[in-house]
Amino acid sequence: MRRVAVDIGGTFTDCFLVWDDRYVAAKALTTHQNLALGFNESLRQAYDLLGLTLEQVMAEVDSVRYATTLGTNALIERRGPKVGLITTAGFESTVPLSRGRGYGEGLPERLKKDLPMAERPDPIVPIPMIVGVRERIGESGAVLMSLDEEDVSAQIRALVDRGAQAFVVALVNSVVNPVHEKRVEELIREEYPEHMLGAAPIILSHLVVGRKGEYARTSSAILDAFLHQAMYLGLSSLELNLREHGHRRPMQVVHNSGGMAQLNSSDALQTIHSGPVAGVHASEHLATEAGLGGVVCTDMGGTSFDIGLIVEGGVKFYDFNPVIERWMVNIPMVHLVTLGAGGGSIARYDRLRRTVLVGPESAGSDPGPACLSRGGREATVTDADLVLGYVRADRYANGAIQLSERRARAAITRAIGEPMGLDAIDAALAIRSRVDHDMANGIAQELRVRGYEPRHFTMLAYGGNGALHCCGIANAIGIDRVLVPPFSSVFSAVGASNMDQLHIHERSLYLSFYDSNTRRLYDDFQSFNAVVEELEARGRDDLLRQGYAAADVEHRLELDMRYGNQLAQTAVVASVHRLRSAADLLAIIEAFSRDYGQRYGEGSQAPEAGIRVNTIRVASYVKTQKLRFSNVLPRREDLKAAPPAREHFDCWFSGHGAIRTPFYRHEELQPGSMVAGAAVVVSSSTTFLVEPGWRLTIGEHGCGLFERIGEHRVP
């Protein structure tokens, strides 16, 4: 197995190179002006460690896999084409009005509650760029009003005259009958062939989303069109970079559904948050292989802190109506919560509350934290870690990046110390305490809202800053066990290297598996099976088009089910792919009842209200060869105390003051070595901070297990 996986983040570009039985991780600063430069630098570091050449790697790897923040950055910067929306006449205000709570979607809780200052986001498609055409499809797919083609042509010309550079066609009920959307696309191409208008993307909403929900489906298509240009230019330049260096296989793009596909089979919207999703996928694989039970995934990078949840058995949560930036969409996406807390998060003094606030603003990689000496003047979390002694100025990023403690102290004193009357050390402790508690609160909310207690979960801490802050987060939330996974600083890239080819197709429909009025079970198995066969065929065609054999394609059937008219909806994985008898139907109902009880409490099931299916979803995938994680933790008989450290430096801890702390080189510690806090273990890519009351056990491939050895107290 030889492959390259890359996670392009807001601050760093992470590279993970697999070369037979050798694994290498590397990092480089993200070059936003040309992503290929950061990729080339991180890959160069990796192949240099193996004594290889770029041409050798590019010619012999079986795949190059990208997870990227291109789409996220384009949305934040509002960098995209002028989009024109064609919808059904009478529904032109669907997107501008959004939903009643649309003003708060994508905002922190404190801003959602600030109703007097509530503002809806600036529209991607302004009202003059929205037109309605005369047509109507009924909810069952019947054509109630034929498409007025002359009206369509007139509206297309009006949008072009207003400067439209991309078209979105989102007609009412097109998911059950897309005939009118397809015809509008034909009319656009007839009216403005490519040699006249250029390669203007035309996005049909039923191809982006297969479920009903006019606002969310239209928003999904709009975002897809808006991101199309940035994704095409960015990813195609990355693919061209591969070609120039001898790689001849198709580039693979990580999707936020938890799989990947070739670039020509990827929608722009599917790449949003793909990096953090890759980390959750790697966590799921590790939790299953290592028998960790329930885990909460935490990825602390330079810009953000991402939280995912995997319950016992290796099952991750999905959002079927996620919010991207400020808009609700309805694509299936691995559930994530993102906080503005990373190494580059900016600390400031809140004069109203007389306290420290950290994030969500970030210094990024340019100019970066003050200690990088790249022109940054804001105090950040990394500056605080340096001042507190956890990070050594001459050993950051394995010595490749020199830090300035003097600049860090000056920035912290100016931003926090002077307003609060604190010296640099106490101000740095205040910054660290705030960011750790913010992250802990995010984890607690994510777990408890689903009925879980943090103490029953193992915390996975990865990302460049995960091992540095995990003890502080765990102290604040009451978690007693933290695992820093293998290659933690590039764990999302590890996840990308372990992904399967995956395509998800779904269809909205309304079925009553059990009608409470007639007390009858659903029996139209032929219609149900026909929908499943169609969705499987679409997924199979996607994978065959990418060169995979039909015999290698597998399918997973999922149903969105609910009791009666409840809003609470549960996705159930069906044990059978075809309904052939009442026994098959009852097996699915039993699985739904079991899942519902686990989520909302046993006894909360309400079959007397009826059992309904709203969506049929088929995930089609091809399994690929995986990295194995089963032996990352040492056996009990291999445990031993770490040898004495060669170096000691002063570090400051909240509630303990200055402690003369041993510093270990990670490569000098054998698997099974145990280090009691306070201690610091420095590896080439991250720093393990063992706070007082904790013990670190070293595992394979940079893995580390933190366990509480003192009595827990909330600081």
Image (cartoon, grey):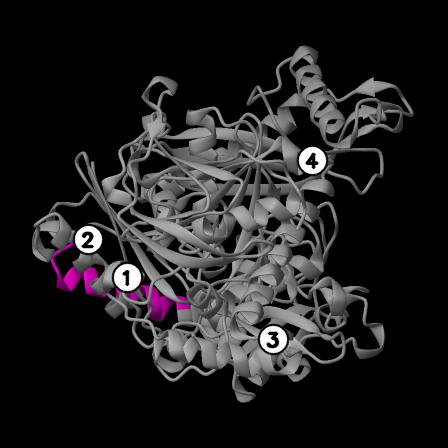
Taking the magenta stretch, the answer to whether it contains residue 111 is no
Residue type at the position of mark 3: Leu
Height in image: 565 above or below 129? above
Residue type at the position of mark 4: Glu
Query: Residue sitting at 65 percent across and 62 percent down?
Result: 171
Q: Secondary structure at mark 1?
A: loop
Task: Identify the magenta region.
Answer: 231-248
**Label drawn at residue 422:** 3
The tag earlier along the polypeptide, 4 or 1, is 1
Height in image: 553 above or below 355? above
Quadrant location, the N terminus: top left
Cα distance in 3D space between marks 1 and 3: 28 Å
Query: Residue sitting at 44 percent across and 68 percent down?
Result: 387
Height in image: 518 above or below 27? above
Q: Secondary structure at mark 4?
A: loop
Question: Crowding near pointer 1: few (<14 within 10 Å), some, many (20+)?
Answer: some
Cα distance in 3D space between marks 2 and 4: 40 Å
Cα distance in 3D space between marks 1 and 2: 19 Å
**Is the C-beta separation of discs 3 and 2 under 8 Å?**
no
Q: Which residue is mark 2?
A: 46
**Label drawn at residue 395:** 1
Q: Nearer the viewer, mark 3 or mark 2?
A: 3
Query: Residue sitting at 63 percent across and 31 percent down?
Result: 456
Q: Secondary structure at mark 2?
A: helix
Residue type at the position of mark 2: Ala
**Label drawn at residue 55:** none
Query: Residue sitting at 47 percent across and 68 percent down?
Result: 344
Report the front residue among 521 and 49.
49
